[in-house]
Amino acid sequence: MNMTIRLALPADATALPAIERSAAELFRLNPPLAWLADAEVADAAFHVQAIRQARVWVAEACEGQLAGFLRAVPVDNQLHIEELSVSQHFQGQGIGRKLLSAAIAQAGEQQLCAVTLTTFRDLPWNAPFYQRMGFTLLNADETAAHLIDALHHDSAHGLPAERRCAMRLMLR
Ligand SMILES: CC(C)(COP(=O)(O)OP(=O)(O)OC[C@H]1O[C@@H](n2cnc3c(N)ncnc32)[C@H](O)[C@@H]1OP(=O)(O)O)[C@@H](O)C(=O)NCCC(=O)NCCS
């Protein structure tokens, strides 16, 4: 499938909540996490704000339809990935990998030292995927303050702390 990865434009924001909701349907495969498929997602106004800061990438199918997005924020010379979502219909076709590669490439061009994220340790489309992309699991003593905050934020939103982990890809 022809898929373009590009930085998002403000006009893309209206499509992103539906992508995040559709992507989350995947969590129904893991019954204790099925509630995530019905959880609230960020609204379009939130996405417009993030897009204006130029840290959101979208995957656009050739018909102009958006299939997925990645949102990240720079923190302490690192790029922290806050969200990666691919609509259910488009999953498993390499789009998530392409979005992640675009973010990593930009972080490298901008001389950032690492890319970070928090995710589920045990879901096959989470930590094992990031490990294949070169990310490593961080121990408590290697976990930077922004990742500890992100893990606390995850727990505060009901994500089971024992299944969450922080990961980092060093760039230099
Ligand atoms: C994670 C996500 C964005 C990946 O998007 P995608 O377009 O399906 O990803 P890709 O097709 O590029 O596949 C990525 C890897 O995950 C694996 N994968 C994808 N879907 C999978 C599934 N349902 N079961 C098992 N593995 C899966 C693929 O094997 C692939 O690994 P590889 O490239 O090393 O072979 C997508 O699954 C999603 O939106 N999930 C729900 C939200 C989520 O978990 N976001 C990440 C938060 S940290």
Image (spheres, rainbow, N blue to C red):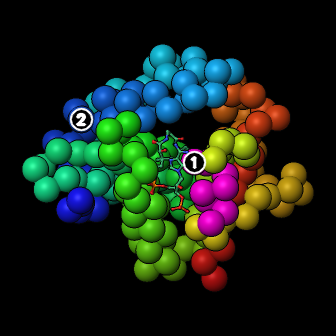
Q: Nearer the viewer, residue 69 or 89?
A: 89
How far from the left and from the top, in percent, is residue 152? 73, 34
Q: Can you say whether 95 is above or below 22 in the image?
A: below
Q: Could you classify mark 1 by the number of other residues whose Cα lies within 10 Å: few (under 14), some (14-19), or many (20 or more)?
A: some
Residue extending farthest right: 141
Residue 125: x percent and y percent? 57, 48
Question: For the point 66% across and 32% down, which residue is it?
Answer: 154
User: Please, what is the three-letter code of the amino acid marked with disc 2?
Assistant: Ala
Instruction: Using the rendered view, name the quadrant where residue 134 is placed.
Output: bottom right
| Residue at point 67%, 52% (across, down) | 127
Quadrant in which the C terminus appears: bottom right
Q: Nearer the viewer, mark 1 or mark 2?
A: 1
Is label 1's Cβ within 8 Å of ligand 1? Answer: yes
Residue to which mark 2 is pinned: 15
Which residue occupies 50% across, 32% down? Answer: 26
Q: Residue at x 47, y 52 (%)?
A: 72
Give x and y (percent) for residue 153: 66, 32
Q: Quadrant of residue 160?
A: top right
The stretch of residues the image draws in magenta is: 125-132
Asked whether residue 156 is in view, the answer is: yes
Residue at numbered disc 1: 125
Mark 2 and ligand 1: say if the CB distance to the nearest ligand atom is below 8 Å. Answer: no
Which structural element holds mark 2? helix
Alpha-carbon distance for marks 1 and 2?
23 Å
Height in image: 126 above or below 158? below
Quadrant in which residue 35 is drawn: top right
Q: Give the quadrant of the N terminus.
A: bottom left
SS state under label 1: loop
Q: In this picture, is 137 found above or below 44?
A: below
Between residue 70 and residue 3, name the one nearer to us: 3
